[in-house]
């Protein structure tokens, strides 16, 4: 499995076969899957400007759920779980919704990882619901491969 490292975030990932590392204006570290059904599934990482403390995470999760319920037609939360990523406390949510301008629903992921040295890391990903059974295991592989490399 090839790896991809983002020096500014201090995060290293392993990418599944066919996936590529990159970036976007919103996600300095981005894993992008191969084209399937004219769509490229993705998982992006960014650093929040908010402090990495439990109270902030709780407020962010509450705000995210309120936004999802208010703005995402057909929003359904499929799972929400606490976990550890590279030994750091994390939250990871899976949900679906129907964007008005698409023919099929999206399966999306939202996560937060609290790290003492790297700050609060946000994780966001998306695929088409019809691709979810093959894409979700790859997303979880990438997520659990994340390593927070010490800054020098």
Image (cartoon, helix red, strand yellow):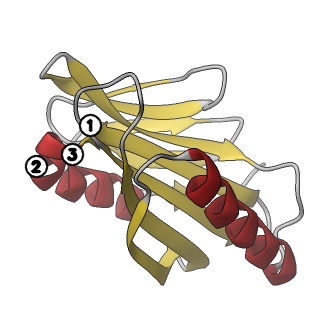
Percent coordinates x, y for residue 116 in the rendering: 79, 71
Residue in the picture at 24% in, 22% down: 39
Label 3 crowding class (10 Å Cα cut-off): few <14, some 14-19, many 20+?
Answer: some
Mark 1 or mark 2, whichever is nearer to me: 2
36 relative to 106 in the view: left or right: left
Vertical placement of residue 140 versus 30, above or below: below
Quarter of the figure that contains the N terminus: top left
Name the element at disc 2: helix
Name the element at disc 1: loop
What residue is pinned by disc 2?
Answer: 134
Residue in the picture at 75% in, 63% down: 63
What residue is pinned by disc 1?
Answer: 2
Disc 1 and disc 2: Cα gap in Å?
Answer: 19 Å
Disc 2 and disc 3: Cα gap in Å?
Answer: 10 Å
Q: Which numbered marker is on residue 129?
A: 3
User: Quarter-wise, where is residue 15 in the image?
Assistant: top left
Mark 1 or mark 3, whichever is nearer to me: 3
């Amino acid at each position: 499995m090839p790896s991809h490292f983002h020096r500014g975030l201090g995060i290293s990932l392993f990418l599944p076969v066919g996936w590529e590392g990159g970036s976007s204006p919103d996600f300095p570290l981005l894993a992008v899957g191969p084209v399937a059904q004219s769509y490229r599934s993705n998982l992006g990482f960014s650093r929040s400007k908010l402090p990495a403390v439990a109270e902030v995470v709780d407020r962010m999760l509450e705000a995210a759920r309120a936004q999802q319920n208010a703005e995402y037609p057909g929003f359904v939360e499929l799972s929400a779980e606490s976990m550890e990523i590279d030994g750091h406390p994390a939250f990871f949510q899976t949900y679906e919704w129907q964007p008005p301008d698409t023919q099929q629903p999206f399966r999306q992921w939202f996560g937060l990882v609290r790290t003492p040295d790297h700050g609060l890391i946000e994780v966001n990903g998306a695929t088409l619901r019809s691709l979810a059974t093959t894409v979700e295991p790859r997303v979880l592989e990438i997520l659990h491969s994340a390593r927070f490399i010490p800054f020098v």
